Amino acid sequence: MKKLVIGTAAAVALAAGLAAPTQAENFRIGYLNTLSGGAAILGKSQLLGWNLGLEMEGWKKNGDKLGGVPTEIFIGDDQRKPDVGLRAVRKWLKSEKVHVVAGVIWSNILAAVQRPVTRARRIMMSTNAGWSGMAGKNCSPYFISSSFQNDENAEAMGQLMNDEGLKKVFMMAPNYQAGKDMLTGFQRTYKDGKIVGRILFKLGTRDFQAEISKVVASGADGLFIFPPGGMGVAFMKQWAASGAGKKVKLYTNYAVDYVTIKPIGKAAVGTFHTMHYGPNLKNPRNEEFVKAFVAKNKRFPGLWSVQAYDGIRKIADGLRGVKGNFKNLKNLVKVMRAQGLNSVRGQLKYNVNGFLIQPWYKRTVSLNAKGVPEISVDRMVTFKPDSYGDKCPKKSWN
């Protein structure tokens, strides 16, 4: 009987030339992360930043407003497996009708899930992975990033090692898409010396003794290595124990951060890396973020937390920018890109492919007055658009 009354009321309203009342649609986000296994340290760090960003926006539970719009959020664990991530995304697209798929730490997982998302004309937001395949000719108007394009950090590293006079360099990275992007980016800018060796090691490797011996035997005066997460913790400890650092200067990407520095300990001291963020950057947004993050977590934030925090707040800014009208998701991305990113890294602009244009800094690890390893921003190395944007069709803005 109740359904009949509702239906009759709607019919009367339409017959009178009035629009039948409808319930406002919630905005729905699927957040894909790595929350189990050896790489969970990164995923959990992302989640800390994501949740803090939601808290800052006043969102506590499904149905609360984000950027003025009632929003639901679904959390998924990809287990660092592309097929698992793809199943979660397909379920969200079909059953939950999500408007945004966000998150994604690993580039091989981004490569697996991005096409189903963008073909469904839904928004793909990366809060970490920066796969080169989405940056150039295959860019999408439905894509936006709150992190980086993979090659950028390695390009900054190549420039840094030029600046510091390294003449013979050995390169190492895990054998998956981001590792290959890193080595490509490094070689694009490292021009003043010679690459004397190259190793692509298995993703998830924890024993680096053989590789360290090869680096030392090569006669290199510097090593560039990209070993994210638990791989980096294991490598840094073994490098320090081997004494290789007495002969070869160590430059890392995504190994030493405030997520990993505690388990690495003093093995990180005296090493260098490039990064787009440091907790001591001077701007009001960063000071607010660091204060809140330290109060909740009793440590400084790492880059994974930074990017997730910026990501969810970017979505909120976008929803405010379209005044809550998110029916045209392509337009929502266009507005989000045009706004730029009001980041803890500063006010940043977007390239045509949806990746950020941002500064990269040299960071140094040293002991503070209390004898605890501390990361400090040394100087800016580069500040330029990524190397693929000019291959992205300008129509992706339309």
Image (cartoon, helix red, strand yellow):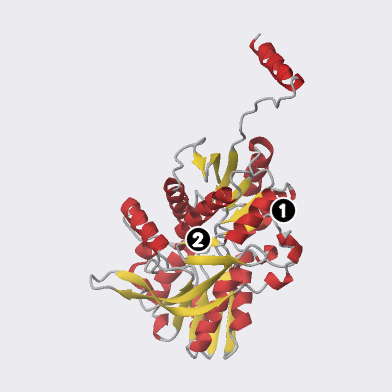
Give the residue displayed 44% in from the left and 43% down from the top. 58
- Choose the circle earlier in sequence order: 1 or 2: 1
Determine the image quadrant of residue 197: bottom right
Q: Position of residue 20 (x, y in %)?
A: 69, 25
Q: Give the amino acid type for the residue marked by disc 2 in the picture.
A: Asn
- In this picture, residue 88 sits left or right of residue 254: right
User: Are dots 1 and 2 in contact, CB under 8 Å?
Assistant: no
> Badge 1 local density, few (<14 within 10 Å), some, or many (20+)?
some
- In this picture, residue 220 sits left or right of residue 115: left
Q: Position of residue 26 (x, y in %)?
A: 59, 37
Whole-number angstrom distance, CA of label 1 to CA of label 2: 28 Å
Nearest to the observer: residue 14 or residue 380: 14
On the rendered image, what quadrant is the N terminus found in?
Answer: top right
On the rendered image, what quadrant is the C terminus found in?
Answer: bottom right
Give the residue displayed 36% in from the left and 61% down from the top. 300
Q: Please, is residue 366 above or below residue 311 in the view?
A: below
Residue 109 visible within the image: no
Residue that numbered label 1 is attached to: 115
Q: Position of residue 53 (x, y in %)?
A: 45, 51
Count of numbered tags: 2
- In this picture, residue 356 sits left or right of residue 280: right
Q: Residue furthest left?
A: 370
Q: Please, is residue 337 above or below residue 211 in the view?
A: above
Helix, strand, or loop for circle 2? strand
Nearest to the observer: residue 317 or residue 236: 317
Q: Give the amino acid type for the residue marked by disc 1 in the picture.
A: Arg
Helix, strand, or loop for circle 1? helix
Give the residue displayed 52% in from the left and 35% down from the top. 63
Residue that numbered label 2 is attached to: 342
Determine the image quadrant of residue 259: bottom left
